């Protein structure tokens, strides 16, 4: 059985990208391309690895936004 593993990351300066690439290298030989992740894809994988830089102990806004998209939306404004 082939496992589907997603490596999802945000990298402004390339450091987290380097970490994500090293993690992915353990799962496959190399990236053919780097697709943009969509929240609905999370359920397709057997494992999902997240990588994001932190600022003052919090994840970056881009990663937080991505994860916020996985939950139910709040009340709709009238």
Image: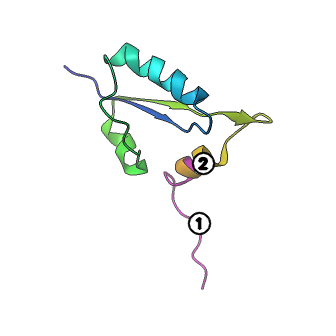
Query: Residue 31, image x and y in percent?
Result: 34, 27
Residue 78 % position (x, y): 60, 86
Labels 1 and 2: the sequence-earlier one: 2
Residue 29: x percent and y percent? 31, 16
Q: Residue at x 61, y 80 (%)?
A: 77
Which stretch appears magenta?
67-78
SS assignment for the magenta stretch, majority: loop
Hey, which quadrant is residue 57 in on the image?
Answer: top right
Residue 27 locus on image (x, y percent): 35, 17
Q: How many other residues sit within 10 Å of disc 1, few (<14), some (14-19) or many (≥20)?
A: few
Q: Nearer the viewer, mark 1 or mark 2?
A: 2
Q: CA distance from mark 1 to mark 2?
A: 19 Å
Q: Which residue is mark 1?
A: 74
Q: Could you classify mark 2 by the number of other residues whose Cα lies within 10 Å: few (under 14), some (14-19), or many (20 or more)? A: some
In-image side of 38 versus 76 (left or right):
left
Q: Residue 64 magenta-drawn?
A: no
Q: Residue at x 80, y 36 (%)?
A: 56
- Quarter residue 5 falls in: top left
Q: Tell me if 70 is positioned left or right of 78 in this view.
A: left
In the displayed structure image, the side of residue 69 where residue 12 appears, left or right: right
For this rendering, which residue is in front, 27 or 3? 27
* Residue 69 is a magenta residue: yes
Quarter residue 41 falls in: top left
Q: Is residue 60 left or right of residue 11?
A: right
Residue furthest to the bottom in view is 78
Tell me the element at label 1.
loop
């Amino acid at each position: 059985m082939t496992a589907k593993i997603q490596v999802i990351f945000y990298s402004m300066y390339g450091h987290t990208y380097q970490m994500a690439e090293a993690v992915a290298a353990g799962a496959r030989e190399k990236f053919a391309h780097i697709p943009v992740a969509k929240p609905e894809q999370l359920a397709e994988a057997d494992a999902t690895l997240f990588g994001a830089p932190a600022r003052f102990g919090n994840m970056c806004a881009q990663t937080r936004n991505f994860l916020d998209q996985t939950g139910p939306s709040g009340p709709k404004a009238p």
